[in-house]
């Protein structure tokens, strides 16, 4: 099917948003977080509510299928389809009202749940359901999936908090779905689609009430099909700690709330314009206890006992997730609460007004391994649990955890029985899987590890699915409890409810959507669950011969496919992904870039479309700041900078490079030439005409002043001879532009008693790699290794430097450049440190501290780390590394350090100097860094940053002078004489 020219012509006249019909956009929106892939007809990104209505109205006129979409974090395949995608996440994201008196909020569908919670928190309120994807999930998707989360035993499902909704019906008409009083409704009838739909609703309520009560699963945690039980209203059971008076919230026989039908409907009944939802009071205090078990079954068997203590949540974390989390840097550093290597742990939460009472409650539950009292301690525990879905998919192999039985909910008293059978089913299929999540609600996320590239893997997908369906239903459970149906469990709906209740659901669908244009082929009309797979036995790739080595059993293709689509890169906090945070464009997310690369190597398109896709991939990767945030914050550990280096290296074999790439890639060479004539070079570059000429010729922005070369060089001063020696890796900025940084490093190392051996080569080649000069970077790396060997033939000395990208390039990237020298590189990697990290490991650090202990200095210093430093994981020796190391070193010298939560600065090496990138660079800076500096009133001398580019950006974007932490520490010591 294609979009008709007449439809497109009319839509373009009425639509002010973006209409994207190119192959790249269709590729970007062909997947969500599920195992499926279906290419859409096109993508419409409405800017206004009028745009949204126009799209629906014209779709009805021309019978065009449409699919409203939020963040695309759906796990059942409900956010993809052969339809026109309506992306409501980009612009329709306003919080229209928060009413603290009525404890309600009115939101547009694109509002991210965490954003709503942050705004509500000012009034002591929050949205009760708390899915793990809250930092990127939109309210339209939260409601569309009937999402809930860890605290479902308190707050139930999204349906329980939906007051009313303004919707667009399938014919384009506007309507309000809210509370219906039957007596009043009988007096109001017309010929509208809403009226017809209401009549069907009343018929269902009257004719099918007994069938609904007889055939619904016994668990209250159920999101399969439509919420017919809310029309009665009736529920087979209720959340154990439900905060309301009755469940569902409305049990008055003469009324029901039509809006609850939207919950879990996946956009198949109406398109949401805005929704009014209930908020709940945030608990004043919470506490966590962690209990260890010898098996997952033992943990699940213990849940009914633990529920008797009336906790607010009980979450299951298996050994598999614990072990994998220790291998992902940003998660590994949060694992201090874990003792030993238990087969499973249960995290039990209590909430209330009295901290002492909560602590006593958690102690009563049994032999608690850990008690987390502070918000920071609790956040570390929750972060590991919430990233479970992605962490499970972080291993570099073809067999991966597959999401198709991962949303089962079972009456909690039968949870242990369920797990025993699940483990048996997995053993029979010669596999294993992660089993974790909401034990208190009887909901376990289960992901069998299957190789879907092979036929036996696909056959196991169906076989396991059918056996688990039979098991879940036999125990009174449901296959869908918070993630929706989509394609994954849509075909099981009729087996769940029987023919009669399913027919009632079909009747609602026909009445609301007579032309079947609203997200068709989902839920009970879904195709077989083992079709439309993203990867299947017929999936093929064709990659170029990569210049870099990729540590994945499927090589470059595997590295690209490592993205599982969870969409964590769409979050608004942390470092990842700065270009997405600034542009809100799917193509500029880590997931978007991975999808484009995957589309490129699957080669499914005609030559013209393939060229279009290649150009879109280039533009998306060109805007990647190579911040390395994804290597740390993506739960799958996708390394997008490395993929960028590889793609750019290949792309420029057939395309012309920008002159600026040579200038910045070989900046160490250029600077070596210009530094000896610094006064002349600086004067020339400051002239207005010359600056414009250089900018025009090279493609550099005119809006930034050129860096100024220093007239003096760092000096080692009097050479000392010591048994303690260290190799120093210089960088172009510290050597030629900011010699005070390198000088500070020399002074500190000398004061610690080290003889500094200088590498005669500048940098490790990070700038070459960043511009995609892979072969040149490899040659540079070989020279660096040769010089290290010449200075250290016994391979015992540490290699240290000041600039994070250079040090971490040597530490982490050389293995991809020179895989045949793995043993040598592993040895060097264990000995390569930032000066900050190295000094913390020195036995004479106390002597250095004593040298500066009486020196006066500012009490508080604000620290903005380099992104690569933020991404650095824990070291094997257990001592601080990365950001933590710099903070600890500053504290050792008496500074109080305020770590700025400011993400990426936007400069990203020389990215911000490119004319094409300047505006984006400043947008990224304005996201967090510049506003935070203004908000705190930070003055010169009150902020430090470990990155040279960061310091430039702070100076040019915020007008403040930032120093390197080593400079501050060295001056502190020197001031003490």
Image (cartoon, grey):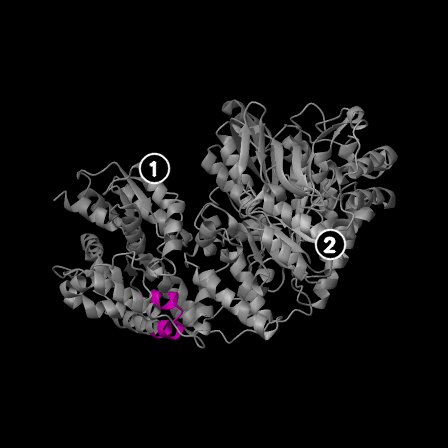
User: Could you say which is closer to the camera, residue 786 or residue 686?
Assistant: 686
User: Could you say which is closer to the camera, residue 853 or residue 739?
Assistant: 739
SS under mark 1:
helix
Q: CB atoms at circles 1 and 2 under 8 Å apart? A: no
Residue named by callout 2: 63
Between discs 1 and 2, the one toward the N terminus: 2
Find residue 21 and name its label: none
Query: Label 1, label 2: how many angstroms apart (C-alpha)?
Result: 52 Å
Residue named by callout 1: 935
Q: Quadrant of the N terminus?
A: bottom right
SS under mark 2:
loop
Count of numbered marks: 2
Question: Which residue: 84% across, 39% down?
Answer: 215
Q: Position of residue 648 (x, y in %)?
A: 44, 69
Q: Position of residue 789 (x, y in %)?
A: 29, 71
Residue numbers of the magenta segment = 762-779
| Magenta segment, prevailing SS (helix, strand or loop) | helix
Vertical comparison of 378 with 655: above or below: above
Q: Is residue 627 left or right of residue 664?
A: right
Q: Is residue 52 left or right of residue 799?
A: right
Q: Position of residue 333 (x, y in %)?
A: 44, 48
């Amino acid at each position: 099917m294609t979009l008709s020219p007449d439809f497109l012509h009319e839509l373009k006249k009425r639509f002010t948003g973006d209409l994207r019909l190119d192959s790249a956009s269709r590729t970007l929106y062909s997947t969500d977080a599920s195992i499926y892939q279906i290419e859409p007809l096109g993508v419409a990104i409405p800017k206004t509510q009028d745009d949204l209505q126009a799209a629906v109205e014209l779709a009805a006129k021309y019978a065009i299928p449409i699919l409203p979409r939020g963040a695309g974090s759906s796990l059942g395949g409900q956010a993809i389809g052969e339809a026109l995608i309506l992306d409501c996440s980009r612009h329709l994201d306003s919080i229209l009202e928060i009413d603290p008196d009525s404890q309600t909020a009115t939101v547009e569908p694109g509002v991210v749940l965490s954003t709503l919670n942050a705004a509500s928190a000012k009034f002591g309120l929050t949205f009760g359901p708390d899915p793990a994807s809250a930092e990127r999930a939109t309210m339209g998707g939260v409601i569309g999936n009937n999402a809930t989360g860890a605290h479902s035993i308190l707050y139930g499902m999204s349906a329980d908090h939906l007051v009313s909704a303004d919707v667009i019906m399938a014919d384009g008409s506007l309507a309000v779905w809210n509370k219906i009083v039957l007596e009043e409704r009988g007096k109001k009838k017309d010929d509208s689609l809403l009226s017809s739909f209401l009549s069907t609703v009343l018929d269902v309520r009257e004719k099918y009430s007994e069938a609904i009560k007889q055939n619904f699963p016994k668990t209250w945690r159920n999101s399969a099909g439509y919420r017919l039980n809310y029309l009665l209203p009736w529920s087979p059971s209720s959340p154990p700690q439900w905060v309301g008076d009755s469940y569902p919230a409305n049990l008055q026989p003469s009324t029901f709330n039509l809006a609850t039908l939207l919950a879990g409907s996946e956009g198949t009944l109406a398109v949401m314009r805005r929704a009014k939802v209930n908020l709940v009071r945030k608990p004043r205090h919470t506490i966590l206890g962690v209990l260890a078990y010898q098996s997952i079954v033992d943990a699940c068997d213990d849940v009914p006992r633990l529920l008797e203590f009336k906790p607010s949540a009980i979450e299951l974390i298996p050994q598999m997730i614990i072990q994998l989390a220790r291998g992902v840097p940003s998660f590994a550093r949060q694992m201090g609460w874990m003792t030993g290597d238990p087969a499973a742990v249960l995290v039990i939460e209590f909430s209330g007004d009295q901290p002492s009472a909560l602590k006593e409650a958690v102690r009563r539950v049994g032999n608690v391994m850990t008690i987390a009292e502070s918000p920071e301690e609790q956040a570390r525990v929750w972060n590991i649990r919430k990233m479970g879905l992605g962490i499970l998919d972080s291993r570099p192999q073809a067999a991966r955890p597959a999401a198709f039985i991962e949303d089962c909910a079972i009456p909690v008293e039968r949870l242990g029985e369920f797990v025993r059978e699940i483990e048996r089913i997995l053993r029979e299929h010669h596999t294993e899987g992660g089993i974790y999540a909401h034990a208190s609600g009887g909901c376990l996320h289960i992901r069998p590890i299957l190789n879907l590239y092979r036929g036996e893997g696909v056959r196991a997908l169906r076989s396991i699915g059918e056996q688990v369906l039979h098991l879940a239903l036999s125990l009174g459970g449901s296959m869908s409890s918070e993630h929706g149906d989509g394609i994954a469990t849509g075909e099981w709906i009729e087996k769940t409810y029987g023919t009669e209740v399913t027919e009632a659901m079909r009747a609602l669908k026909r009445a609301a959507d007579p032309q079947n244009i609203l997200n068709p082929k989902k839920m009970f009309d879904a195709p077989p669950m083992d079709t439309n797979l993203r990867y299947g036995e017929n999936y093929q790739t064709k990659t170029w011969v990569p210049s870099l080595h990729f540590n994945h059993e499927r090589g470059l293709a595997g590295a690209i496919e490592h993205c599982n689509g969870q969409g964590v890169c769409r979050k608004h906090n942390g470092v990842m992904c700065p270009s997405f945070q600034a542009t809100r464009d799917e193509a500029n997310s880590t997931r978007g870039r991975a999808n484009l690369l995957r589309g490129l190597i699957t080669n499914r398109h005609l030559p013209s479309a393939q060229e279009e896709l290649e150009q879109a991939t280039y533009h998306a990767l060109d805007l990647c700041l190579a911040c390395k945030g994804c290597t740390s914050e993506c739960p799958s550990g996708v390394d997008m900078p490395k993929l960028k280096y590889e793609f750019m290296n290949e792309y420029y074999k057939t395309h012309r490079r920008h002159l600026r790439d040579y200038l910045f890639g070989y900046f160490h060479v250029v600077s070596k030439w210009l530094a000896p004539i610094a006064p002349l070079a600086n004067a020339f570059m400051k002239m207005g005409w010359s600056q414009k000429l250089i900018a025009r010729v090279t493609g550099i922005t005119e809006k930034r002043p050129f860096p100024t070369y220093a007239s003096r060089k760092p000096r080692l001063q009097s050479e000392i001879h010591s048994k303690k020696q260290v190799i120093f890796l210089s960088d172009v900025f510290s050597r030629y532009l900011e010699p005070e940084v390198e000088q500070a490093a020399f002074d500190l190392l000398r004061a610690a008693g080290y003889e500094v051996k200088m590498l005669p080569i500048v940098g490790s080649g990070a700038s070459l790699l960043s511009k995609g000069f892979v072969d040149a970077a490899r040659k540079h790396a070989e020279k660096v290794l040769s010089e290290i060997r010449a200075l250290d033939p016994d391979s015992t000395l540490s290699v240290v430097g000041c600039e994070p990208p250079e040090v971490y390039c040597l530490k982490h990237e050389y293995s991809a450049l020179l895989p045949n020298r793995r043993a040598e590189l592993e040895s060097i990697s264990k000995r390569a440190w930032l000066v900050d990290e190295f000094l913390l490991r020195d036995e004479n650090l106390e002597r250095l501290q004593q040298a500066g202990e009486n020196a006066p200095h500012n009490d508080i210093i604000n620290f903005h780390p380099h992104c690569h430093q933020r991404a650095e994981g824990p070291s094997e020796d257990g001592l601080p590394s990365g950001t933590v190391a710099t903070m600890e070193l500053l504290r050792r010298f008496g500074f109080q350090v305020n770590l700025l939560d400011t993400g990426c600065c936007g400069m990203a090496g020389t990215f911000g100097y490119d004319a094409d990138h300047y505006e984006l660079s400043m947008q990224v800076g304005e996201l967090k860094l510049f506003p935070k500096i203004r908000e705190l009133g930070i003055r010169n001398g009150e902020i430090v940053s470990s990155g040279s580019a960061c310091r430039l950006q702070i100076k040019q974007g915020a007008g403040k002078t930032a120093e390197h932490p080593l400079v501050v520490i060295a001056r502190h010591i020197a001031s003490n004489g």
